[in-house]
Amino acid sequence: MSTPNGFPQHSRVCLTRSMEGGAVQDLQAKKAGKAAKKEAGGDGAPPKIGTPISETLKLLPEELKANMKIKSITPRPPRKPRLERAASLDEKSWRKWRRFRTSQESLTDPNETSSSNGSLQEASPSPPSRGRASPCNPCCQQESLHSSPDALEASPGGKSRGGASDLGKRASEISSAFGGLLRGKGFAGGKPRLSQIMPARPLPPMELNVASHSLRTANRIDSDCLDYRHYSQHKFGRVSSSLSDSRLQGNGTLYDSCSTDSMKSTFSVLTPIRAKDVRSRSYLEGSLLASGALMGAEELSRYFPNRSMGIFVATWNMQGQKELPVNLDDFLLPTDPDFAQDMYVIGVQEGCPDRREWEIRLQETLGPHYVLLHSAAHGVLYMSVFIRRDLIWFCSEVEYATVTTRIVSQIKTKGALGISFTFFGTSFLFITSHFTSGDSKVNERKLDYNKTIQALTLPKNVPDTNPYRSSSSDVTTRFDEVFWFGDFNFRLNKDRETVDSILNQNPDTDVSKLLVYDQLTSEMSRGSIFKGFQEADIHFRPSYKFDIGKDSYDTTSKQRTPSYTDRVVFRSRYKDDIQAVKYSSCPVIKTSDHRPVFALFRVRVRPGRDNIPLAAGLFDRDLYLIGIRRRATRELLRRREQKDQRSSSICSIS
């Protein structure tokens, strides 16, 4: 039952009784003060040193003496020292930690539930005032200083039972209580609590968009599924798992719309797809602008927001050596670019006898992030195409063709090997060649080029992305992006002494004087070979011919002139689709008389259609497992060698 003031009926009764009890206590306190003054002589002078505690009590305020809780204390003799065994360091540290935990627990209010982070809050004690309501709970009434029987003993009503002599017996309790009051302790049994630290002024607003534009993660949601949150809330009762964007927002964590939109799936962090969309989509037939097309613009923007990918193209004449380099990291993973490329294409001339071992070494070097999309061979010409494993779904079927430029077709040391496929909506053609050797056989090398562009029958089943710009007499016109690399065998039209003097004058990267005598540069400027192709600027020393295992050029009796025989050229249907990032050689690999030459490119990629023959994610799984197993074994051996080296090291004192 409630009163008009909003208090319960029993609370009103307790409040009335408390107010009456407080008035009685105030009257009794005044009488006790007058009696104490009469006993002390009534002079009201301040106490002197050695004044009994009964006289000190006279100086306390009337309300304080009325509300002071006094308990009887029986003096006890001092305790005898107890012998204990010496504690160890562990026990001492444990005891310190225990005392620290106990002190923390003593400062924690077990009834405090308003703070979720466990911070302590300050409960400032309110001094007792006249007419203040006391707790209505009977337990609180017993603990309250207003209704305590000990407090009543200090009043004149209790003087007949104890008199002023009881105050002397309880002097120590009064002193401790008075000291506790000066230290700010409350009378209601509350414990001191620290206040939560708050900033003096509001913090400045922070930028919420922290997403990096260079990230290539699937952090977007389909435009036709933007209302999936409301649908899932109505259907399933929840919108996401523990990675929901609501938790990020509630905790004040920085987030961006792209990252949180990718978390709006009810069952996983993948982009949600409606059942009706799955029914309507076809991955065999599609259009360029179809929503959800595998090769379409939405999927392309998801993986390549700027619609450009990185491609590594390399060529190396291995001279048929059985011995492979110990480490290929400097060749495939140069330290100059900060990031690895999306695709690796390696062409080899005069390859090693064990082609499978070479491919395993490539897989071992590139690691688990790459898979072998396709590899082909034409005699001792090898080509391997590695791609990031999450991009294999966007490749068409891979096709290849070969051409022999020798008069006798059974001898396959000279010729060309081409591999082609479509990635999203961009068609690629990679050709590696080994042209005729000889300083003066420029015309023969041009014939090799012409035979290759006419006889290389590509593409076969994969449709041309732009047949109106294609020519049946030139294979390089039937693809969007073409990369041609290999040992072209073009030499420098200068004697050995002149070339050596130029190299000695410019030992670093200034090779412009040498390129004046380069046969390939001269023929390309005339348009007699590699029509429409470009080559990046050369800033490295000639890649041929070295002494095996050394940095010196040919020191044999033939004294061959150093030349730029190993080259990488490119062409595109569209202007500025291919941008050369780096063009260099790898001087640390010395197992052949040629140095490997590589180039890094940024290539523009366009969306495509789903009506092309797809590779369906096929790759060389056996090669992948062998390469990764070797990589793990190599790492374990390296760690074991380091461990053995540390254990066998001997420290000597001189």
Image (cartoon, rainbow, N blue to C red):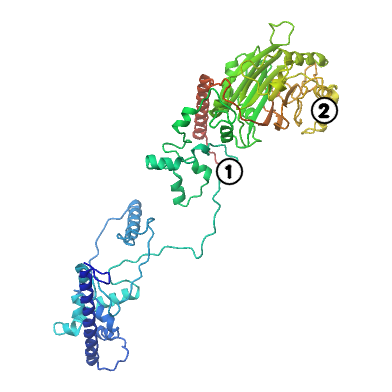
Q: Amino acid at mark 2?
A: Leu
- In this rendering, does residue 457 appear at all? yes
Q: Quadrant of residue 463?
A: top right
Residue 405, position as x, y percentages in the image: 73, 11
Q: Nearer the viewer, residue 306 or 7?
A: 7
**Residue 166 shown left or right of residue 187 in the figure:** left
Q: Determine whether the residue tagged by mark 2 lies in a helix, strand or loop.
A: helix
Q: Circle 1 sits on which residue?
A: 212
The quadrant of the rendering that contains the C terminus is top right
**Residue 534 shown left or right of residue 296 in the figure:** right
Give the foreground label among 2 and 1.
1
The quadrant of the rendering that contains the N terminus is bottom left
- In this rendering, does residue 593 appear at all? no
Q: Residues within 10 Å of mark 1 (few under 14, many from 20)?
A: few
Residue 247, position as x, y percentages in the image: 43, 48
Q: Nearer the viewer, residue 169 or 106?
A: 106
Q: Circle 2 sits on which residue?
A: 514
Residue 498, position as x, y percentages in the image: 86, 25
Q: Nearer the viewer, residue 271 or 528?
A: 271
Rendered residue at 34%/66% (across/down): 192
Rendered residue at 26%/58% (across/down): 84
Residue 629, position as x, y percentages in the image: 50, 24
**Residue 176 shown left or right of residue 155 in the figure:** right
Q: Against 182, is 193 above or below?
A: above
